[in-house]
């Protein structure tokens, strides 16, 4: 989060500042990547919009 908000990551620099709106813990990286893919899909983005 600090790297994104400080502008260190070039791909996300223009979207600053970031804030955490959803946090979930996973057993492993594979499960986390599956959830990340869902959240970046259309229905996942709608889920996140309803949270904020």
Image (spheres, rainbow, N blue to C red):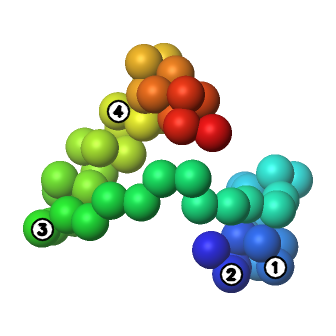
Q: Earlier in the sequence, mark 3 or mark 2?
A: 2
Along the line of sight, the residue nearer the viewer: 21 or 38: 21
Q: Secondary structure at mark 4?
A: helix
Q: Please indicate, yes or no, whether residue 45 appears anywhere in the rendered image.
A: no
Lower position in the chain sequence, tag 4 or tag 2: 2
Q: Is residue 3 above or below residue 41?
A: below
Q: Which mark is residue 27?
A: 3
Do callouts 4 and 1 mark residues in contact (Cβ within 8 Å)? no
Q: Position of residue 19 (x, y in %)?
A: 68, 61
Circles 2 and 1, Cβ within 8 Å, touching? The answer is yes
Earlier in the chain: of badge 4 and badge 1, it is 1
Q: Are marks 3 and 2 in contact (CB under 8 Å)?
A: no
Residue 9, image quadrant = bottom right
- The mark that comes first in sequence, 3 or 1, is 1
Which residue bears the numbered disc 4?
38
Write down the residue under mark 2.
2
User: Up-down: is 10 above or below 7?
Assistant: above
Query: Which residue is pictured at 62% across the width and 74% down the height?
Result: 1
Mark 2 neighbour density, 10 Å: few (under 14) some (14–19) many (20 or more)? few
Which numbered dot is residue 6?
Answer: 1
On screen, residue 35 versus residue 9, left or right, reads: left
Q: Bin the neighbour count of mark 3 within 10 Å (Cα to Cα): few under 14, some 14-19, many 20 and up.
A: few
């Amino acid at each position: 989060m600090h790297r994104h908000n400080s502008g260190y990551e070039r791909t996300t620099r223009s979207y600053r500042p970031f804030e955490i709106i959803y946090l979930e813990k996973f057993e492993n990286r594979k499960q986390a990547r599956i959830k990340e893919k869902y959240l970046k899909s259309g229905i996942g983005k709608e889920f996140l919009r309803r949270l904020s």
